[in-house]
Image (spheres, rainbow, N blue to C red):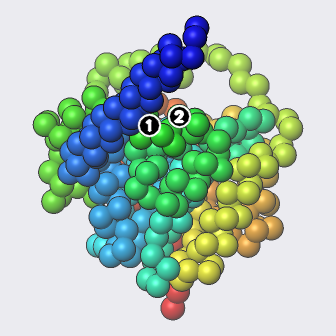
Amino acid sequence: MNKKQLIKSLKLIAFIVVVSYVVDKIVYYSITKISDTVYSGQAIGKLNHYLSIKDTTKLIVFGSSRANHHIDVKKLDASSFNMGVDGKFIAYSATLIKLLPKDLKQTVILQIDPDVAYREVYNRLETKTLMVKYHSNPIIKEELDRAELTTPFQKFYWCIDYNGLALGILKNAIFPKYDLDTYYGYDPMEVHSTQKEIFKNILERNDSIVCNTNLKINPLFNSYLKEVESFCTANNKKLITITTPIYIDKCPEDNMALKKTLEDLNIEYHDYTNFFKDNKHLDYWVDIAHMSNKGAEAFSEALSKDLNIYDE
């Protein structure tokens, strides 16, 4: 390739880069404009909803599906929101907690799964769904960079933020799943006859369970716990951690280990794993780890009476 051809090639490459950069930003801001209006669905809607209420709400629940489907927060406080999201654990919750205002007294209820706390590997991949706010929220950006979940190309091509989420966002923009004015984050699950039969069959199986014997808390999980405690202490938040009920716990050792860890961190903890130990009513359950709407309502009623949510 002679010098003239090289210069021509470099100009073409530069032109393509500039055009692709401009097109990327046009598409990014177009999707973002739509995305910011979506308040339905767990891809972006619930996050947007949370961002809109986090500065004015007194009590917020964080955690996985066992927070989302199990805690009717309106039984705890009229000014409340359930920010539990399926498949999301401590890294996701900690990131959202750090978005709370620093000058407002609030109660933070963090649901923790003991088996996740003691996993040998915890890679915080669930925070990737927060990528939609990577270029619009500095705290989320910092957390995602820290987790090393971004790519070098993302600094240049912002549309990567929406990778795999764009269709879900557009779908919920056109067909919202619920009424924003009445939704407060709690998603109860109804159990149907077919599900009940499936659950019965599961219970009748004599499946062997191998419990984790290496009960050393995952270092990453532990660091997030410390960060949440530190943030809440410094920013006028009352932190309460809980574990919600399961049908049967064949590995109670991790619960005891978690209790000791949280005591050492001076974090209030309530373990409700065996809350329904003496009441095995199948109408209360969808599966071993998730309560039905009936079980969740019974549990939430008890929770409202049991927790000292506000200091005297």
Q: Identify which residue is drawn at 51% across, 91% down.
A: 312
Front residue of 175/149: it is 149
Label 1 residue SS: loop
Front residue of 1/59: it is 1
For residue 233, what is the image quadrant? bottom right
Q: Residues within 10 Å of mark 2 (few under 14, many from 20)?
A: few
Q: Residues within 10 Å of mark 1 (few under 14, many from 20)?
A: some
Decide: is 20 above or below 204: below
Decide: is 300 above or below 134: below
Q: Residue 150 in the image: x percent, y percent?
A: 57, 39
Q: Residue 8 in the image: x percent, y percent?
A: 45, 19
Q: Identify which residue is drawn at 58% across, 8% down.
A: 1
Pointer 1: what residue?
A: 157
Labels 1 & 2 near each other (Cβ < 8 A):
yes
Pointer 2: what residue?
A: 153
Front residue of 156/205: it is 156
Cα separation, mark 1 vs mark 2, equals: 6 Å
